[in-house]
Image: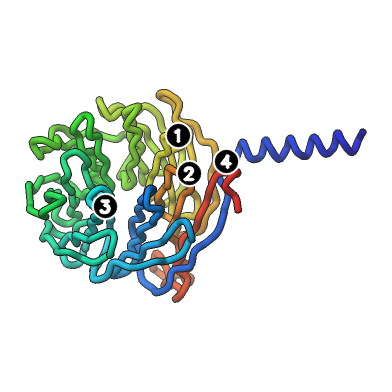
């Protein structure tokens, strides 16, 4: 009887542990080649992960967790936007200030379009069939037609743009202005900034995710906060603490989990419930794993990371160790392999 009771207690403890920490490490996927990285993007239907890496975009088959191709000639690549129904991908090339328009079936570049200086985040807007490239040094957004590549508008932003999201039903585009600690709100019809919302108590937001059903934005702020903002009014509804060096955010509409990935080797996972936000896990990842993408079909998250040498005196970060770039895969307890 004691053995049965003890086994039951151990099983209960394990269940409680899983409930408290829903995400677990699954595997890592090595990526060949050296160089930096930025955004990741998931095509859930096609089961593909796009990873910016040095001067190319590496494409993984998520059913096999294996590299299946590359989009080449993308100097200073930052972001990837996907338009699956058009069989197109759009890549922002910061060093040449251009967008690569790519056939997502063949991964061949069809043509390139000029943008403002140093395009960073790039966003496809369904319904409008338009692509927004947010230009870091240009402090503007270049809007192009997704089919022809024709430049539709250039929108002055008055600050340095970072991550962006769209809400097609309300016709709004939201973009973090990192140096202003504001969210710029763009009208998708007029291609103009209609208002700017302060993100206080948050500061200098980089990452942004969206819950379109409940009209919430999730902002990864440099002062160790993830803020939940009402996307209809700009009001900050809740904040939770996060780690150092946040870069990306994600939101899972089925689990209501919001994620903030940080370069200190932590990803904070919080549950949104109405106008409240509650931390459910501080997931330990690896130092440098500051960017992530979520597959809403499997609930897995993918983070890019590499190892670095110890920094020399006066340096913020050491040199990247050759051959260590990889993708870290985490999932819910039932998805653990």
Q: Which residue is mark 2?
A: 299
Q: Determine whether the residue tagged by mark 3 lies in a helix, strand or loop.
A: strand
Mark 1 lies on a secondary structure that is loop
As drawn, is 250 to the left or to the right of 78? right
Residue 162 at least partly seen: no
Q: Residue at x 27, y 51 (%)?
A: 82
Q: Earlier in the sequence, mark 3 or mark 1?
A: 3
Tag 4 residue:
22
Q: What separation in Å lies between label 2 and label 1 (alpha carbons)? A: 9 Å
Seen at 36% across and 46% down, the residue is: 222
Q: Which is in the foreground here, disc 4 or disc 1?
A: 1
Q: Are marks 2 and 1 in contact (CB under 8 Å)?
A: yes
Q: CA distance from mark 3 to mark 1?
A: 22 Å
Q: Which residue appears at 17% of the width and 44% of the height?
A: 129
Q: Which residue is mark 3?
A: 81
In the rendering, at what x and y percent does residue 10 appear? 78, 39
Residue 111 location (% of width, % of height)? 14, 64
What residue did someone put label 1 on?
254
Which residue is at the front of the view, 40 or 311?
40
Mark pair 2, 4: CA separation? 11 Å
- Mark positioned earlier in the residue sequence (3 or 2): 3
Of 258 and 330, the residue lying toward us: 330
Question: What separation in Å lies between label 4 and label 3 (alpha carbons)?
Answer: 29 Å
- Closer to the chain start, of discs 2 and 1, is 1
Marks 3 and 2 sit apart, C-alpha to C-alpha, by: 20 Å
Mark closer to the observer (2, 4): 2
């Amino acid at each position: 009887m004691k053995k049965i009771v003890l086994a039951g207690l151990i099983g209960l403890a394990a269940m409680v542990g899983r409930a408290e920490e829903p995400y677990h490490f699954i595997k890592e996927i090595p990526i060949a080649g050296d160089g930096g990285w930025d955004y990741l993007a998931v095509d859930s239907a096609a089961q593909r992960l796009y990873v910016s890496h040095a001067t190319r975009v590496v494409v993984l088959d998520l059913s096999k967790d294996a590299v299946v191709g590359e989009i080449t000639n993308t100097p200073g690549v930052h972001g990837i936007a996907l338009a699956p129904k058009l069989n197109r991908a759009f890549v922002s090339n910061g060093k040449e200030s251009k967008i690569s328009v790519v056939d997502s079936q063949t991964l061949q570049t069809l043509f390139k379009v000029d943008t403002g200086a140093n395009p960073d985040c790039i966003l496809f807007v369904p319904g409008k069939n338009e692509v927004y490239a947010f230009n870091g040094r240009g402090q503007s957004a270049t809007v192009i037609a997704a089919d022809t590549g024709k430049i539709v508008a250039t929108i002055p932003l008055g600050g340095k743009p970072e991550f962006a999201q769209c809400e097609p039903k309300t016709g709004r585009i939201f973009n973090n202005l990192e140096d202003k600690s504001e969210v710029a709100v763009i009208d998708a019809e007029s291609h103009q900034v209609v208002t700017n919302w302060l993100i206080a108590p948050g500061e200098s937001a980089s990452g942004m995710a969206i819950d379109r059903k409940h009209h919430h934005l999730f902002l990864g702020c440099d002062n160790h906060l993830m803020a939940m903002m009402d996307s209809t009014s700009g009001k900050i509804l809740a904040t939770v603490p996060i780690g150092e060096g946040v870069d990306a955010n994600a939101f899972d509409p089925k689990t209501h989990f919001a994620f903030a990935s940080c370069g200190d080797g932590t990803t904070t996972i919080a549950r949104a419930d109405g106008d409240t936000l509650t931390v459910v896990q501080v997931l330990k990842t690896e130092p440098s794993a500051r960017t992530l993408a979520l597959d809403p079909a499997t609930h897995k998250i993918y983070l890019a990371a590499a190892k670095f040498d110890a920094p020399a005196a006066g340096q913020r970060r050491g040199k990247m160790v050759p051959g260590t770039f990889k993708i870290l895969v985490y999932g819910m307890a039932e998805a653990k392999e």
